[in-house]
Image (tube, rainbow, N blue to C red):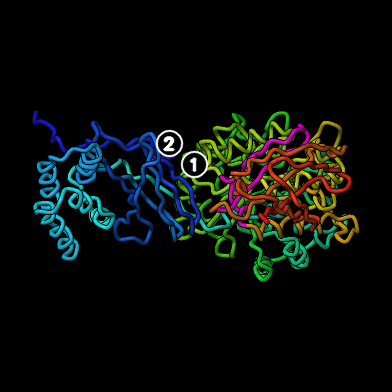
Amino acid sequence: MAARSPLKNRVQIQKISPMVDCGRYAAKAVAGDDVVVGADVFREGHDKIAAVVRYRGPSDSGWREAPLRLDTNDRWYGHFHVDEMGPWRYHVLGWTDHYASWLDGLTKKHAAGQRDLDPELEEGALLLERRKRLPKAARQVCDEVIALLRGDAGLDDKVAAAVDPDLVALLERHPERLDATQSRPDLPLWVDRERARFSAWYEMFPRSEGATETTSGTFAEAAKRLPAIADMGFDVVYLPPIHPIGRTGRKGRGGPHDLAPGPDDPGVPWAIGSEAGGHTAVHPDLGTIDDFDDFVGEARRFGLEVALDFAIQCSPDHPWVREHPEWFKHRPDGSIAYAENPPKKYQDIYPIDFDTEDAEGLWNELRHVVEFWMDHGVKIFRVDNPHTKALPFWEWLIAEIRVDHPETIFLAEAFTRPKMMQTLAKLGFNQSYTYFAWRNTKHELTDYTVELAHGGMVDYYRPNFWPNTPDILTEYLQHGGRPAFKIRLVLAAMLSPSYGIYSGYELRENEPLHEGSEEYYESEKYRYKPRDWNRPDSLAPYITRVNRIRHEHRALHDLRNVWFHHIANEQLICFSKVAPGRTEPILVIVNLDPHHAHEATTWLDLWQLGLEHAGPYEAHDLITDTTHIWHGPENYVRLDPDVEPAHVLSLRAL
């Protein structure tokens, strides 16, 4: 067996970041980002090394490069700019820098007072001489230095010429990579548009707009609600399923256990399909597909994107049940079992069987559903319970859609085991629901946010915080009154770049089906729910203010920059976000107790806020439009939830 070349793999490259599961899945970024790359790069002995990150985007015909610089303990960092949506790839290249190694030895000997350095100087001349592929101007500079190193100049002048910064920079621009080692495999990076990371969602049932207790609203009536949603500062209006609803097994307006619906009870939108059509049809009560197109166009006119629910399940009346019975799991007696999540029963829903022998037909039909709605202007999908569907399907579907539509966004509605939620994000979901709704204490909120923002999930998992959904009315909101709704809104909107609320939040709807339940009393899932949006006690002005703050302050568009500061009260939480360059610091302090006032002294990490050298500084409250002059890290804070439960402060050195 032939001996391996001594020039191969002398440089070790390990622990590259970002890297998800050894490159099995793509890390995530947004167009316009500078993607920070880190790697352990080293070799045996004392020779100096150099390294770059090589990268290419979807439109690149070749590799681009950006330098890596040594930080500490053999850890190197650099960054490259992503300017286009779609799939990117990158790897690290490392090599021995022979000139830098020689120069290091020369300068150390010279500094130690050694004068007989002619052999060392000749070695340097030979290193420069062998650089044959330099441009003409660079070759001329090197020739001049070679002549000086071999000439009659004094030792100090020769060393000065060898260490000249312009020469060193020139050689760095034209490196000699005799033993270059490339990390393998190339690592994937998926680059989204900005809305995949920063967005405010508003969920509404269009059938409730313009409705009565017994008649449905329409798309045209729902469109009248869009200006108010846009005025509150939301970016995305999300609609639960808008398809025909089956009759078989329909739930009545009394809730999940009401199996005796009246003739005017509309049924649950997630029981998709009837004689009027399935996943590519709209409910006749809402209007026609043209009416939906008009709704999408009106939303766009107000700066809103429409997100649709993608729920892979069927009413027993869905056309697929007749046309493709092989897509459903049959019991021994030939019947199809309805969906269950014990103790919950969904008598109005048949689950799809992803073990069907016609998997190809099923997968292609589901892709057709997504493409159908994309043809009608929808580029955002909230996916219902993706953790109960085949994971290879999601990886395939998202990749297929992205070929022609990299702007598409998929939100995973999966409240399940952590590893499953994480895997869905790895497979390509752009955003993910979280456990935020049930994290209430200072300890819970801090630990969970740190896990999301600074743990191993940060490279691929984008959280979307929801204080409530049609399925989730938490105990905190049930019993906390108006302050609880303000507290959870501020926490969701300021901690996470993406968050959402379900309509009725601004009216503080908080009555549960029964004590201990997270189901709403008179839930909109089972009935039409007309509302008085003009109530004087609405939180709409407060929501508007919070969303305006989010849009106006770049620091709130990121997750990785969240930092928790000490405040000496367990009912008060204090965190900051700072834009790149340590500019525009935003400090948020929230009273987590909706029933009592609390006070404490902050202990701020001023260095993190860019204020370590500041004297007095201005703390301007963006919610109340009041200004305080603070000094140093210690400042007194008192928050009364009946007055204002939160400070959102813009800090500025005076």
Q: Is residue 526 left or right of residue 390?
A: right
- Is the C-beta separation of discs 1 and 2 under 8 Å? yes
SS of the residue under disc 1: helix
Number of dots carrying numbers:
2
- Expressed as whole percent of the image width and height from the top left, the position of residue 591 reads 79, 40
Magenta extent: 554-580
Residue in the foreground of this view, choosing between 222 and 250: 222
Q: Residue at x 66, y 61 (%)?
A: 552
Observer-nearest of 58 and 346: 58
Kindly identify which residue carries mark 2.
Answer: 21
Type of amino acid at the residue the image marks with label 1: Lys
Q: Is residue 256 left or right of residue 151?
A: right
Q: Position of residue 634 (x, y in %)?
A: 72, 40
Residue visible at 75% across and 59% down?
206
Kind of residue sitting beneath label 2: Asp
Can residue 259 be seen here? The reply is: no
**Residue 577 placement (x, y as % from top left):** 63, 48
Q: Pick out the residue farthest to the right.
A: 536
Does 235 sit left or right of 352 as displayed? Answer: right
Local SS, label 2:
helix
For the N terminus, which image quadrant?
A: top left
Dot 1: few (<14), some (14–19), or many (≥20) neighbours within 10 Å? many
Report which residue position mark 1 lands on: 426
- Determine if the magenta segment contains residue 568: yes
Q: Quadrant of residue 103?
A: top left
Structural crowding at the residue carrying mark 2, measured as other residues with C-alpha within 10 Å and reported as few (<14), some (14–19) or many (≥20) = few
| 142 with respect to 392 (left or right) | left
Q: Residue 576 at what x, y percent from top left?
A: 65, 45
